[in-house]
Every structure is written in C-alpha cells, then in structure tokens.
Image: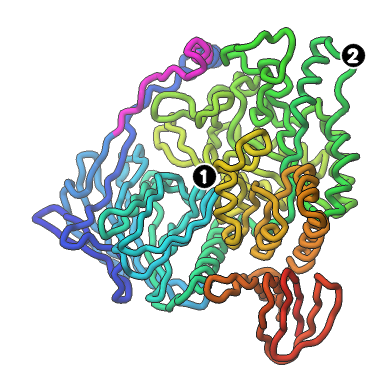
C-alpha cells in the first residue's frame, strides 16, 4: 500500500501465499472510485391528481417521437475518487483492516479481510475487500476498481458466459477482450484462472450483479469492475475475494475439473445464502408456442373475416405433440408465452407508430407473445381448463410442464400498467427502462408488481398444477436498477426472493434466461433466429461450432442451438441440455441422418436413468482427446460413466456394470474397457 502525506496512492501489488496476483509494476493500482446519484427528473407519475394520465401522456409523447421515449433529462451523478480523498488512518481488528477516507460527501471505509476456503479438497487462501459509506451517502450506487493481472504465468481463463464458453491462454502474446457486461446475467459470477503453478479464484460474498470488462493492456490483463452497493443506512459493497491455491493443474482436463469444483462450491454457498434449491437440467422441448398463423386467424375471426375461431392451441398441442415427446423420453415441456399478451390484440400497443392498415389483419400486424398484459393464461389458446388437461396428461406420461414467465416486465399497453404506472422502472438517462425492446418496459420488483406476479403464479398453479417457470429477462430486468429511488440498488435481491417463493409454492423446475449459479441457465446461442429465417452460417452457427466438442461448457445449462446426435449426447454427459426446439427440427435431422431420432431417444433414456447418481463431475481426457465423463455422488459408491471413445476406466476391486446402451450386465475387476457412445452404471 502506497501513502503520501494524508493520501492513499493505492496498492502496488497483491500476493497470496507468495504468488503475485496483480501488479502495476512500479505504479500503484488506485483505490476505488464511487458514484453517487444526486437528482433524477422522475417521475411524471408523481404529479398530484393525475398519476395515471401523466403516464398516458408520456406514452403519447413517445408515439409522436417515432416510438422512442422522450427523455425527461438525465440524472445528476458525482464521482468520488478515494485517491483524492483525505486519509484519516486505519483500524485493525483480528484479520480485518479498515482504512478511513474523508470525502466532501461523507466518510468511506475500505475494509480488507482474510479468508481461506476448501474447494474440491484444495485449500484456497486469500484476501477480500469491500467499501462502506457513512449515513448521508445513501444515494451511492457503484464502486469502480481495476485489477491488473500480469501475463505469462501459465494461467488459463475459464468462463461459462451467455452463449459461449471461454478457454483462453493468458500468455504475453494473448489477444483478449471481454466487453463490458453484467455478471450473474451475461457472464459467470466468478473469475477462475488455472495452470501448472496453481489456480486463482475471484468472487463476491453475496449474489449481487456486478459489471465486468477485461482487456489486454501491454504485459497485463486488466479487469475493470463496477461493484454495487447494497441496501441500508450504512450501504456497502459485497466483499470481493481473491483466493489462490498452489495445487498444480497441469493439463486441460485438470483445469476444467478444477473449474467445475469451483462452480459447485460457489453454487452451494449461494444456495445456502439464499435458500434456493438445486435443480438438474433435463431433456427439454423448448418452443411450445402457437404459430403466427394461429394468431392471425384469431384476429381475423375477431374482425368477422373468418367464420370460426381457431381450435385452442393447448388442446392441439396436447393431442398431437405431447405423447410424441414422451416417446422420445423428453420429460420437460416448456410452453412459450402462455399469458394474455399483445399477440391477441391488433396493434395492441396503441403508442407504437402504426405502419399498416389494421382493418384487414396481416402477419406484420401481430404483436409479441413476450409482451404480456397480465398474469392470466390466455383464453385464446384454451385458458386454464386446457392447461389443466395438458398438465394432467403430462403427469400421467411422466412429464413436467413449465411456463414462460415475465419476471419483471409488462407490455406498455397492459391495462395493469396503466392502472399502476408506479410499477415502471426508470433508467438514469431519464426514460423508462425498456432495454431497447420498445413494446415492453421493466417492472420495479420493490413495488406492487412483485405481489401481482407472485399472486398470479400462485393462482394458476393452484388451478392447473404446472411444475415450474422459465424466468424471462433475468439477465436484464431481473438485475437492473430503478433510478427513480432515492437509494438506487439492483433488484436482484427481489429476483432471488421471487425464485425462493416460487420454489416454496411447489414449483420445482426453475430456469432463468441468462447465466447464473442459481436456477438452470438457458439461452444465448440464438437458434430461434435461425428457426425464424435467420442465416445459419452467421452468429447462430458460429456459436454452435464454438461449443461443439466442448459441451462440458454447458454445465447446468439448457441451450437453444443446432441438433446433432453426438453433440447432444456429450451435452447430456456433461449435465447440460441441447433442447429440442421443435419436433420438425428432429424430423429434418432424421432425413439427413437415418436413425438420429432413435439415438436422441436412447440418449435421453440413458441420461435420465443415471441422473440420480450425477453429483460430482469428472471430465476424462488425454491430451486434446475428450474420452468421456464420470460421475459420483455422496449417497453411495455408484459411478455413472459416459464413454465417447474406447478407453480403460480403472475401478477399485470388482464392480457390477450395467451397460445401459446394450441393455446387459456383467462384472469387471480392475478396469472397465469401454465402448464408444456408451453409458454405464457401475455398482460395488
């Protein structure tokens, strides 16, 4: 730590167990900079007498502005650099050191503490830091800090992000850039580096979203962070830890297995902190949704252009597709957009510029099913009665049904939003937070919308018995900040409370849009774009090629991507799922690869048969060859084994082997000689 008179210049280097973690060479890493929000021009809804009309007027101005919000003016913010603050001394209490800074706005404490953790049997020792502000600084929002990591230390960067899995060698010749994004949404919420000289782990003590940017600057990899301040009169950031293990991770598979253990340890820690239970990804049917033609027919019938309404879609799905999915051993059926939404209303959003004659409905007049009006099952697709029948049949077939759910957004045409304009979330630029979608806007989960959504889910669950939810926009609205509040903070605490309450009502299947250690991660690979006419050799195909052969990166992840038999099997072996987008996707594959349907069915059956034993993952490989995956669990000595190529798998003593692929059993001693694309269950 460098000091000059009554100022702290920063940290020159950080070492853990003699290992250099970060350094600026002869320069100092400056102390954090904090951001405060002083005044925001919100909201017009607070005008006395006409709160609802004020919201309507604001939407009307949006329509006259070609569909863009008319900004009310940005918030006034202030940055305070602790490097320029007056240093008032330090206080030592056990293994905690607190540095005190006096700023023009109040007192800031930079607190350091030691921590040792046992992860996968290896000891990780290290140091954590946090910031705390004095009363009177409740409007603080972010703490900004940079961590420069010296290159050329044989470290590899491993990360599961939304739509990709990264394995990057951090050498002096590395070209590497990770653009600014939000951890817990788009990026995994921890940093993990591993190599022959050890492993480095960076993480937060609380599941709070934080912004990350990584870029190579000369001989260093600079990690720029924005840490959020939590609630309370003494607002503080979560403790940010650096921990190091000197255990050597000499090859690719050792590094990946170490990453898996770090993932498991942190996920277990956060589950204990939040009370959210663990789930396991299952073979999934992803895109249960009526066609655009269904809704066009519906709107034309409403206009008197068709004699009869379309047959309720939930009934059609139940009678034509549900049984076929059960035959494929697909136990999880995901219904997209089942709620009353813009799709049922011709030019539902009257505040969008109208580009077409709405007297004769056309396909381009349709709104979005992901722009819901309320937490009511759409009567147009069959409503509660048909959903109940579908769920009952699914349960008889051993399947579960999960519903797409709008975690924290509504259509801007929603009558419920017009009745409750205070539910809307606002950005610091002076506009409602719509994340660029245009037809929806984010909801503040600290307000009345929280109980509105939870009440709707509770009611529909009681009526139908559905099994779980997919929380849309977890990675955006679920983590966002409502700058209308005096003490702005991320609403992730309310998002996690929502997830906990959902599980408590008996909804065991919990999926989120984004990358998280809580709930099953989903999305990001973009097959929806290809399905609806996108160019497959562009982004979607490139993302698939980047994960093909590296499906271990889909750990606890259900993804939307291209379907190939071997890739599908490797994903399941890794405890990830490449979801079946539509049945037509499998039919097209069968035409190209005869027998593919049976291979997919068999893979699902084998995975579900050994899933109860899949707790601790061990990737097996030699050199660059990925041989398979072995799984153990704490309740017994059984081993689930997936083999991609023939190899010898060592066993202790004699073990009974159930070859699930060939349907036969036998006993081995000392080793099991595996066959390619085979699944085994070994028992003592």
Q: Is residue 31 left or right of residue 64?
A: left
Percent x, y of residue 301: 83, 15
Name the residue nearer the viewer: 473 or 140.
Answer: 473
- In the rendered view, tell whether residue 684 sits above or below residue 517: below
Q: Residue at x 52, y 63 (%)?
A: 266
Question: In whole angstroms, how far apart are the C-alphas of marks 1 and 2?
Answer: 48 Å
Q: Is residue 61 visible?
A: yes
Q: Is residue 367 left or right of residue 179?
A: right
Q: Determine crowd level at label 1: few under 14, some 14-19, many 20+ residues with C-alpha closer than 10 A.
A: many
| Residue furthest left in the image | 5
Boundaries of the magenta span: 58-77
Name the residue nearer the viewer: 203 or 595.
Answer: 595
Q: Determine crowd level at label 2: few under 14, some 14-19, many 20+ residues with C-alpha closer than 10 A.
A: few
Percent x, y of residue 335: 75, 40
Between marks 1 and 2 in the image, the one whose residue lies nearer the viewer: 2
Q: Give the SS element for disc 1.
A: helix
Query: Which residue matches tag 1?
Result: 492
Count of all numbered marks drawn on residues in the image = 2
Query: Which residue matches tag 2?
Result: 307
Q: Is residue 25 left or right of residue 616?
A: left
Q: Give the SS element for disc 2.
A: loop
Disc on the earlier residue, 1 or 2: 2
Magenta run includes residue 60:
yes
- Looking at the rendered image, the quarter that the N terminus falls into is bottom left
Percent x, y of residue 252: 50, 71
Percent x, y of residue 534: 62, 35
């Amino acid at each position: 730590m460098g000091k000059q008179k009554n100022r702290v210049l920063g940290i020159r280097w950080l070492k853990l167990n003699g290992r250099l973690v970060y350094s600026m060479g002869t320069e100092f890493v400056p102390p954090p900079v904090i951001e405060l929000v002083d005044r925001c021009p919100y909201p017009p809804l607070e005008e006395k007498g006409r709160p609802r009309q004020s919201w309507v007027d604001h939407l009307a101005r949006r329509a006259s502005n070609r569909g863009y919000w008319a900004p009310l003016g940005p918030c006034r913010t202030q940055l305070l650099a602790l490097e320029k603050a007056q240093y008032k001394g330090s206080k030592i209490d056990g293994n905690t050191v607190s540095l005190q800074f006096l700023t023009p706005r109040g007192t800031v404490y930079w607190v350091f503490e030691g921590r040792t953790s046992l992860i996968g049997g290896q000891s990780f020792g290290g140091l954590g830091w946090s910031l705390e502000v004095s009363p009177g600084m409740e409007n603080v929002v972010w703490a900004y800090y940079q961590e420069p990591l010296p290159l050329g230390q044989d470290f590899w960067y491993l990360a599961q992000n939304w739509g990709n899995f990264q394995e990057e060698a951090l050498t002096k010749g590395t070209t590497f850039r990770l653009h600014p994004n939000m951890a817990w949404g788009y990026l995994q919420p921890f940093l993990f580096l591993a190599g022959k000289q050890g492993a480095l782990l960076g993480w937060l003590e609380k599941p709070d979203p934080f912004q990350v940017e990584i870029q190579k600057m000369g001989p260093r990899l600079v990690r720029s962070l924005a840490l959020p301040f939590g609630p309370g009169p003494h607002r503080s950031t979560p403790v940010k830890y650096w921990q190091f293990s000197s255990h050597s991770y000499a090859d690719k598979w050792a590094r990946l297995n170490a990453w898996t253990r770090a993932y498991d340890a942190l996920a277990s820690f956060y589950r204990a902190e939040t009370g959210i239970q663990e789930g396991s990804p299952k073979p999934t049917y992803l895109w249960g949704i009526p066609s655009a033609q269904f809704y066009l027919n519906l709107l034309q019938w409403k206009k008197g252009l068709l004699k009869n309404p379309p047959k309720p879609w939930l009934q059609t799905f139940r009678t034509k597709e549900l049984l076929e999915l059960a035959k494929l051993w697909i136990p999880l059926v995901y219904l997209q957009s089942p709620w009353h939404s813009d799709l049922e209303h011709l030019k539902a959003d009257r505040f969008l510029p109208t580009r077409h004659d709405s007297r004769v409905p056309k396909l381009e007049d349709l709104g979005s099913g992901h722009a819901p009006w309320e937490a009511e099952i759409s009567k147009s697709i069959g409503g509660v009665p048909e959903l109940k029948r579908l769920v009952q049949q699914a349960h008889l077939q051993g399947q579960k049904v999960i519903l797409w759910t709008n975690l924290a957004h509504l259509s801007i045409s929603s009558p419920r939003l017009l009745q409750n304009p205070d539910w809307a979330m606002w950005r610091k630029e002076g506009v409602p937070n719509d994340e660029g979608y245009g037809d929806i806007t984010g909801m503040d989960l600290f307000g009345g919308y929280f109980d509105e959504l939870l009440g709707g889910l509770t009611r529909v669950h009681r009526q139908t018995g559905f099994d779980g939810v997919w929380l849309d926009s977890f990675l955006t609205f679920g983590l966002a900040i409502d700058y209308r509040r005096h003490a702005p903070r991320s609403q992730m605490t309310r998002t996690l409370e929502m997830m906990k309450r959902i599980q408590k009502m008996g909804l065991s299947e919990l999926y989120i849009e984004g990358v998280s250690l809580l709930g099953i991660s989903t999305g990001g690979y973009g097959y929806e774009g290809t399905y609806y006419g996108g160019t497959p050799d562009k982004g979607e195909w490139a993302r698939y090629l980047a994960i093909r052969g590296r499906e271990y990166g889909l750990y606890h992840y259900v993804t939307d991507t291209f379907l190939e038999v071997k890739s599908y099997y490797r994903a399941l072996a890794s405890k990830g799922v490449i979801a079946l987008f539509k049945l037509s996707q499998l039919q097209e594959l069968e035409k190209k690869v005869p027998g593919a349907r049976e291979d997919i069915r068999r893979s699902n059956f084998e995975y579900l048969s050994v899933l109860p034993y899949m707790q601790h993952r061990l990737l097996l490989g030699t050199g660059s060859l990925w041989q398979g995956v072995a799984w153990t669990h704490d309740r017994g000595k059984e081993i689930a084994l997936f083999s991609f190529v023939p190899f010898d798998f060592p066993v202790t003593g004699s073990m009974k082997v159930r070859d699930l692929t060939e349907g036969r059993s036998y006993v081995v001693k000392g080793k099991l000689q595996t066959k390619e694309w085979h699944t085994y269950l070994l028992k003592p």
